[in-house]
Amino acid sequence: MNENPPMEAARYPDGSMLYPSHPIGPDGNEPVETVDLSAYTAELITWTTSTATPPGVREPNHIGIVEFDVDGEPVRAIGQLTSGDVEIGQTVEPVYVDELREPGAGIREPDSQAWDGYRFEPVD
Amino acid sequence: MTQFGQREAWIRELLADAGQACLDDAGVDGSELDHLYVSNMASGEFEGQTGIPNAVAHDLNALPAYTARIDQTSSSGGAGVYGAWQSVASGASELTLLIGGEKMTHRTTAEATDVIASLTHPAEYKHGLTLPSFAGLTARRYLHVHDAPRESLGKVAVKNHKNGVDNPHAQFQKEVDLETVMDSPIIADPLRLYDFCPITDGSAALLFCPESVAASYTDNYVTITGIGGATDTHVVHERMDPTTMAGVVESGEIAYEMAGVGPDDIDVAELHDMFTILEFLQSEGLGFFEKGEGWKAIEDGVTDRDGELPINTSGGLKSKGHPLGASGVAQIYELYHQLRGTAGPRQVDAETGLACNVGGFGNCVITTIMEAAQ
């Protein structure tokens, strides 16, 4: 059983999905359900390796935009990659990390948001 | 407009200097102002100084003019232009001074980057997303989808540095060659140091009034004929095409319609080249070039100062510098001089100009179209 927090995307009445969820979706309505994306793999849309990172962020920081296919519905996410040795189009899977960035090291109030989440790891 | 670069002055002095210079140039006393706006993103975060419009109004003898600070992140300057234009167009003010400015260089690059990155969604911020990293992500996708050479981005930096040599207010008045750009350190792969604008202190100011008032001061003024603002999602990865900035497209359409012109009518443009890739995205989003072909324009010299459509004759943010709240104001300052024929060695043949000021990573956009007075 997966004990990690879900990577929760919202599904809206028109079928569209967003991650992170928003109170109002593209169709102007509230979400009708959530979907845990951590159970899915995704395609790497693009990526970068940032060498000039702000306080509390690992250096270098590999980052990617990925696209999940949830029963034919695309939903995108952004996040750290576990490796910079990747290619556009590669398959990745979410891997839970309890602290993506050191809370309080940057300008944002530590208690104002969560700091855990999912990195994306290339799948052979 | 004040010197852009590393300045000893703090935000209040930077703003007052640009404001006073503008008033002196127009022959207007501060006491004549109805409205005074200050475009600024983050003086509280950078310097611990808030309430700056009130302080600057005092410094400029503008009391009791109505004052307000306008923050729209990197497009605070453009938003200020929009606000100042609205104040006059609505009849609320007959004389509005807009001053844009930012004081940044006393912070380390990492600290300044973090202040700017504080505009990101929590789901982005916790991953360490910065504006430069968004640029790297977008540039890689653009080069991949459009089969564009990496060197084309480097040529934007070369062009804008060349233009900046002739701008006495520019932070960098120095040419760079393509080899230097392509050999510079990686910042957000595939983008390198010279693909990014610097961190800058500086300020710029503009005076807005109805044409009837302008004509009482001078025959050589310019008019805003079209202006549009638009907002896109601030969750950048939600955009299904990362290489299209919807805010650019939509603000451009509004401005074109208001001005009664189209992309082919634009003679000179100031685009928000905070990163080299943004010059391609805006030149395509504004309809100057087909989607995916902005890179060909730089290769063919179309956007050079002596090309068909000169882009960033001021040197752009890339060379002139990017004091956040000042940049959108400084874009209009450049067009003001280009359209009046007072741009000196940077002068091009232009009757209609366009400026595009981008906040966040395309999150908020202001497009302004201007013409010389007839």
Image (cartoon, coloured by chain):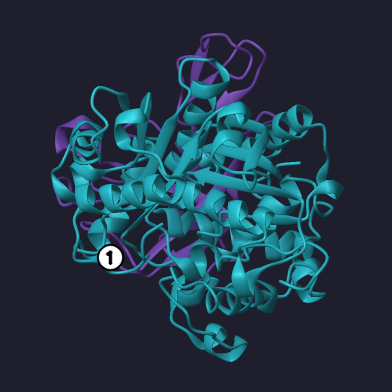
Residue B263 place in picture, x, y as percent = 81, 46
x 82%, y 75%: residue: B300
Can you give x and y, in whole percent of width and height, for residue B127 in the image? Answer: 35, 49
Residue at the spot 40% in from the left edge and 61% down from the top edge: A82
- Nearest the camera: A122 or A23? A23
Using a 10 Å C-alpha cutoff, classify the residue at mark 1 as few (fewer than 14 neighbours), some (14 to 19) or many (20 or more).
some
Residue under the image location 53 percent in, 52 percent down: B333
* Display colour for chain A: purple
Label 1 sits on residue = B109
Task: Spot the residue most to the front.
Answer: B216
Q: Is residue B70 visible?
A: no
How many numbered circles are shown? Answer: 1
Vertical order, B168 against B184 (above or below): above
The quarter of the picture where the C terminus of chain B appears is top right
Q: Chain B appears what colour?
A: cyan
- Say left or right for B214 vs B320: right
Along the line of sight, the residue nearer the viewer: B120 or A37: B120
